[in-house]
Structure formats: C-alpha cells, structure tokens
Image: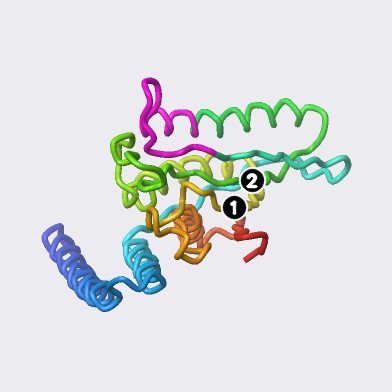
C-alpha cells in the first residue's frame, strides 16, 4: 500500500467521523430546543454534548509511577482544592493566573509528598474539592463585569483543561487518586431565581461530572460527589 492509498483511507475515515459528529450535533440541537427552559433537561443536554465531544478525544492513560511496594507505615496525601473561582478578575488575578496556580499547586503536592516518601510510602492521594472551583456569572449584581469568561467557558472549556492538567500530574505520581467533590455557592444557576433550582443544578457539580467523564477509562482515579450532605 502506497502513501496515496493510506491518505485516501485516512480521508475516508475522517469523513465518516465528521458525518457522525454532524448527526450527533443535530440530535443535540433538537434536544436543546425541546428542553427549552426545563432545567433538568438542559443539564442533561450539556452532559450529552460533553459525552459526544469526548468520543473524538482518545485521552492517553497516564503511566503508573514506580513507587514503593512496602505496606508498613503507609500514609495518604490529602490535598484541598477550593475557591479557585475560575474567571474571577481582580488587579492580580484572572483565568490565566488561576491556571498557573492550580498547576503549581499540583507540583507542590508532589514535591512535599516526595519529602515524606523518604520516611514512609505514600501511594495514594485524596483530593477534597471543596467548592467554588468556578466563579459563576450571576451570583451577585454586576458580576458579569468582573469575570473574563462566560459560565460556559468556565465549566466546559477552561475548567476541564486546567483540572485535567492538575489530575494528570497527580496520576503520574500516585498509584491512586480519590476525589471528593463538593459544590459551592458560586456554582449556583439562575441568578436571583437560583433558589428555584434543585441544589444539584449547579455548575460546580457539572464541572465535577465532566471531569469524571474525562477520566472514565482510568480506573486509578475515582470521583465521589457530595450534594447537601448526601454522597452520590
């Protein structure tokens, strides 16, 4: 088989994938139109859109780190990830700075853990994601003028990109990562009408769900969601 034949096969495969995506996008547009203002249906449509897009991304698995096999005196690293408030703008803060700090934090977790490993094994990391990972958009009057990206970008673009880098660093240095995800008030939807929304209808919650979908094929990382004191 020559190069022209290979190029032809690749082009045909890509054409089929494009047609499948067009078909899926059409279904999603119809679903969103049908959902209209039904909150639960809208959220389900978002998850469907993310699931569709993930089908085109074959995320490579992170290789397991070579760590001590000793079982004696094992300890667990515990990291608290909270109040990133992604998209918030102040004189010295924005999405770009938030991304640098989250990645720096992941590297610092590894650095401090390696110091502890000189005395005992540390093979597992528990991440307590304690809410307000996103800044939101209608949490208080005028907030839309104090953010550098929409809620859509916070939840489906910047949030997944930044957190994927964060969790990839941990997976490259721990055999197991357990994430316990709590929603924050900055994830609330609906502006002044947010009290009419179910507590589970929360953009923090949606971001956490998207992250579990991103890592759906990696058995070394797990996500537990806590909403109003109930584990899900």
Q: Which residues are magenta?
A: 83-102
Q: Name which quarter of the figure residue 52 lies in.
A: bottom left
Residue 26: mark: none
Q: The N terminus lies in which quarter of the figure?
A: bottom left
Judged by depth in the image, the label closer to the viewer, 1 or 2, is 1
Residue 128: mark: 2
Q: Identify the residue shown where x is 27% and y is 73%.
A: 36
Q: Main secondary structure of the magenta part?
A: loop
Determine contact: label 1, label 2, CB under 8 Å.
yes
Q: Horizontal and vertical percent for residue 48?
A: 36, 69
- Note whether 48 is above or below 158 in the view shown: below
Residue named by callout 1 = 182
Q: Secondary structure at mark 1?
A: strand
Q: Horizontal and vertical percent for residue 54?
A: 36, 61
Residue 88 covered by magenta stretch? yes
Label 1 – label 2 distance at C-alpha: 8 Å
Q: The C terminus lies in which quarter of the figure?
A: bottom right
Q: Identify the residue shown where x is 32% and y is 52%.
A: 152
Residue furthest toward the right? Answer: 72
Image mark count: 2
Q: Name which quarter of the figure residue 44 lies in.
A: bottom left
Q: Horizontal and vertical percent for residue 154?
A: 37, 46
**For this view, does 170 lie left or right of residue 26?**
right
- Note whether 69 is above or below 195 in the view shown: above
């Amino acid at each position: 088989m020559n190069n022209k034949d290979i190029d032809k096969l690749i082009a045909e495969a890509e054409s089929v994938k494009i047609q499948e995506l067009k078909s899926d996008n059409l279904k999603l547009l119809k679903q969103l139109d049908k959902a209209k203002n039904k909150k639960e249906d809208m959220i389900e449509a978002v998850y469907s859109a993310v699931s569709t897009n993930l089908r085109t991304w074959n995320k490579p698995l992170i290789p397991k780190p070579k760590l001590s096999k000793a079982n004696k005196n094992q300890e667990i690293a515990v990291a608290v990830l909270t109040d990133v408030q992604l998209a918030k703008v102040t004189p010295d803060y924005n999405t770009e700075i938030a991304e640098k700090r989250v990645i720096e934090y992941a590297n610092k977790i590894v650095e401090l853990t390696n110091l502890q490993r000189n005395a005992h094994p540390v093979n597992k990391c528990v991440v307590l994601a304690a809410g307000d990972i996103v800044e939101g958009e209608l949490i208080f009057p005028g907030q839309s003028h104090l953010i550098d990206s929409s809620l859509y970008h916070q939840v489906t673009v910047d949030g997944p990109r930044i957190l994927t880098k964060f969790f990839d660093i941990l997976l490259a240095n721990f055999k197991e990562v357990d994430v316990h995800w709590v929603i924050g008030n900055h994830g609330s939807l609906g502006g002044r009408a947010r009290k009419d929304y179910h507590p589970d209808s929360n953009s923090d919650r949606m971001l956490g769900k998207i992250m579990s979908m991103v890592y759906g094929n990696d058995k070394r990382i797990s996500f537990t969601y806590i909403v109003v004191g109930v584990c899900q």
